[in-house]
Amino acid sequence: MLKDITIGQYIPGVSPVHNLDPRTKIISLVLYMVGLFLVNNFAGYLFVTFFTIGIIVLSSISIVTILKGFKPLVLIISLTLVLHVFMTEGQIIWQWGFLKITSEGLRQGIFMALRLVYLVSITSLLTLTTTPIALTDGLEKVLKAFFVPIAHELAMMMTIALRFIPTLIEETEKIMKAQMARGADFESGGLLSRAKSLIPLLVPLFLSSFRRADELAMAMDARCYRGGEERTRMKQLVMGSGDFFAYLIIVVFLGVSIYSRIW
Amino acid sequence: MPIILENVDYVYQPGSPYEANALKNINLVINEGEFVGLIGHTGSGKSTLAQHLNGLLKPTKGRVIVDDYEISAAKKSKLKEVRKKVGLVFQYPEHQLFEETIFEDIAFGPKNLGLLAGEIEKRVKKALHMVHLDYDKYHSLSPFTLSGGEKRRVAIAGVLAMEPKYLVLDEPTAGLDPRGRDEISAQIEELHNQGITVVLVSHSMDDVARLTERLIVMHQCAVVFNDETRKVFSHFERLQEMGLDIPTVTKLMFRLKDKGWSVRQDILTVEEAKQEILLALKEEKHHA
């Protein structure tokens, strides 16, 4: 159950997408999102679909891995679809009692659901092809370039959070087992009794998280961590010709999206 | 009735890139009333094995039989019944404490068994008594105000309150000061004398030598030795190859033998060693 969590997972590889500079990937992702939310007609969506599939193929990440990331989002995506399909006013094409489907609603629903699907696919592609360290390094540089004041601290917080996800999952499993050995039951009963059964899990989990945070802070202090001021790096990020091509491609993508909108 | 493991295999995360064998063809019997030690290098599979004994993990292949209950991948078993019979104390059990008072925390297990208030109170009293903590003094305190050793004893009491027939302890003395270690060891010995079957997973050769009757040695997910403790520790070289050791006294006897003393090497306690050395000295005088 807990093993299904794939947030922040990195899959090693040597694809053109893996080899890009993390800054390129972050900036491209933002531009991709802009493009994705600009398109609003059939031709535009067709273009975005092919573009997205192309990037996924290029990354040599298996489609199954990406689909796995959708598991927790199935509800929100289907809710988007259903709400749009049934709630939009317009030309009615099907009606049963108070339920009615309009052609505008159908169109809007499918478009919105597709947007979410593409958004999640490409965002998870970013974490799947970038090591957490490279990702936070890139993020720090990008934030600094936009004059965000505490860029280093934000990036550091993200690194630590990502680093502790597997540890926390492991810890949760361990405490769960320990309480199950004392006859605790996490899997049956109504909503209320299930929520109550989480107390023996959450209290020890919070305690151990605080303990870990304390220890980590102490260990960082002991090694003279002073934040980001005048910090240098062993591995400097360098852009290559691949990054140049990536920018070219994403600018063309954005151009086509804008064109499809005003055309 | 015993706990029986038949051809047990366990595979971690089968089908994923992280697939790994954790247990390979384990066949074991743990009889009622025994005190069994389980040793092995880190990652040898001993904690995984311990979790099979009360159904927290189900074997990928083979089966585990606890009294009348069978646990296997295919079968849906009454795990609650199994956990009632087999108590499992994890490493650092004090990390699972969560209630506001020690009473409530120890009562967690019995409550899950659906016992009545009177019976629960009786069991909490008994469990606290078993770990040598005074009920009147401790029952209304918060478990988080205690010292490390006391916390661990409360956590062990939490498992004892389920009144298990078998008790599996995963490194119960890890991270304690010498006094806390001695106290816990003594209490485990006492529990065994009261008729509880004990399986002790440990890294301390001295502890298992002093306490256990039979020793199971695991290496690379398989059982290598399963014999009387004394006999197992005679395989000094094999154990060292596996990254394990023998008790300090036993090592002393091996060294003495190397130096030309005529002493036995299957010695496990300081008392036995003393006798043996005195005997050797006497003989030497005799010859001289």
Image (cartoon, coloured by chain):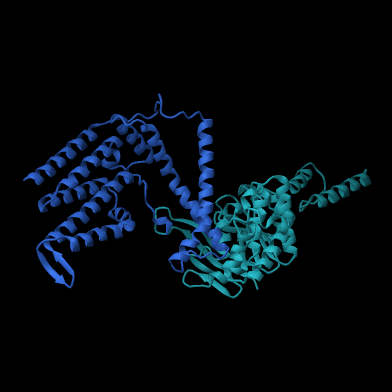
Chain colours: A blue, B cyan
**Is residue B196 found left or right of A187 in the rendered image?**
right
Residue B85, percent from left and from top? 62, 69
Q: Which residue: 15% across, 42% down?
A: A253
Query: Which residue appears at 13% of the width and 63% of the height?
Result: A102
Does residue A118 sit above or below A130 in this rendering? below
Residue ranking furthest to the top: A230
* Residue sitting nearer the eye, A220 or B211: A220
Q: Is residue A59 above or below residue B137?
A: above
Q: Position of residue B218 (x, y in %)?
A: 60, 56
The N terminus of chain A, quarter of image: bottom left
Report which quarter residue B108 is drawn in: bottom right
Direction bottom: furthest residue: B68
Q: Residue at x 11, y 66 (%)?
A: A92
Residue at image coords 85%, 51%: B275
x then y, percent, for residue B97: 59, 55
Query: Is residue A94 shown left or right of residue B6?
Result: left
Q: Is residue B212 visible?
A: no
Q: Nearer the viewer, residue A251 or B250?
A: A251
Between A262 and B20, the residue placed more toward the observer is A262
Q: In the drawing, does residue A63 fall left or right of residue B255?
A: left
